[in-house]
Image (tube, rainbow, N blue to C red):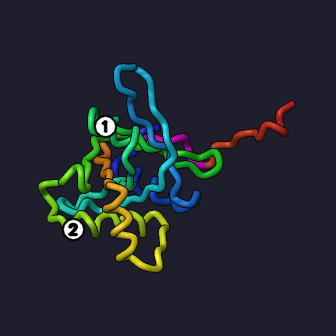
């Protein structure tokens, strides 16, 4: 069922909180008409420049970023038990190899911290965290939702061992 953006993002926030902020990321593989899938730690935060609510995660160099640089559109699926919610939208990238013109360099550094903390992360030394993020060329991925959908809340599903 389709959801409005504000209600859908509230459900995304709830589902992420119920499953340690883990979500499935779906992008498109280059030269193929098939999905590329990964698990990420995600959170709903306000966009650092526009203030609009978005879904965000931190990515390292690899297929996720290569796919998003080529085609900046992604779907995130958050689940808790059998209940799930999906968000699809365009993706902004913000990192050392993908400077965001709307953000100063220090704001980009703080954005990585903000996403990490919103997705349940805790680090005893945030300066060391910042250095590791820069050394690893980590990038903030900010998904602007243009479509949110879900299965109905309270959907009943049988576990495999319960089936006849």
Q: Is residue 31 left or right of residue 26?
A: left
| CA gap, disc 2 and disc 1 | 23 Å
Q: As drawn, which residue projects farthest toward the bottom? A: 124
In this picture, is 99 found above or below 163? Answer: below
Q: Which residue is mark 2?
A: 107
- Residue drawn where x is 65% and y is 49% of the image: 81
The percent position of residue 107, horizontal first and vertical second, equals 21, 68
Front-most of residues 11 and 141: 141
Q: The residue tagged with tag 1: helix, strand or loop?
A: strand
- The C terminus lies in quadrant: top right
> In the rendered structure, which segment of residues is drawn in magenta?
149-153
Main structural element of the magenta stretch: helix, strand or loop?
loop
Q: Is residue 135 visible?
A: yes
- Residue drawn where x is 51% and y is 58% of the image: 21
Front-most of residues 1 and 27: 27
Residue 94's disc is none
In this picture, is 27 found above or below 118? Answer: above
The percent position of residue 42, horizontal first and vertical second, equals 44, 55
Q: Nearer the viewer, mark 2 or mark 1?
A: 2
- Residue drawn where x is 34% and y is 60% of the image: 135
Q: Are marks 2 and 1 in contact (CB under 8 Å)?
A: no
Q: The residue tagged with tag 2: helix, strand or loop?
A: helix
In this picture, is 21 found above or below 131? Answer: above
- Residue drawn where x is 32% and y is 51% of the image: 141
Q: Is residue 91 left or right of residue 58?
A: left
The question of residue 152 being in magenta is answered with: yes
Q: Is residue 98 left or right of residue 36?
A: left
Q: Which residue is mark 1?
A: 73
The question of residue 108 being in magenta is answered with: no
Q: As drawn, which residue projects farthest toward the front? A: 135
Front-most of residues 70 and 155: 70
Q: As drawn, which residue projects farthest toward the top? A: 32
């Amino acid at each position: 069922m389709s959801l409005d953006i504000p209600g859908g993002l509230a459900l995304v926030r709830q589902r992420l909180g119920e499953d340690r902020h883990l979500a499935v990321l779906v992008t498109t593989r280059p030269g193929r008409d098939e999905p590329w899938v990964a698990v990420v730690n995600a959170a709903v935060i306000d966009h650092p420049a526009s203030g609009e609510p978005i879904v965000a995660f931190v990515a390292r160099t690899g297929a996720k970023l290569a796919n998003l640089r080529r085609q900046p559109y992604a779907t995130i699926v958050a689940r808790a038990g059998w209940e799930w919610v999906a968000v699809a939208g365009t993706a902004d990238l913000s990192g050392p190899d993908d400077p965001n013109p709307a953000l100063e360099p220090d704001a980009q550094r703080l954005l990585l911290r903000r996403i990490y903390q919103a997705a349940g992360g805790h680090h005893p030394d945030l300066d060391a965290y910042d250095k590791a993020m820069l050394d690893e060329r980590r990038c903030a991925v900010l998904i602007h939702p243009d479509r949110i959908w879900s299965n109905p809340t309270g959907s009943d599903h049988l576990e495999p061992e319960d089936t006849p």
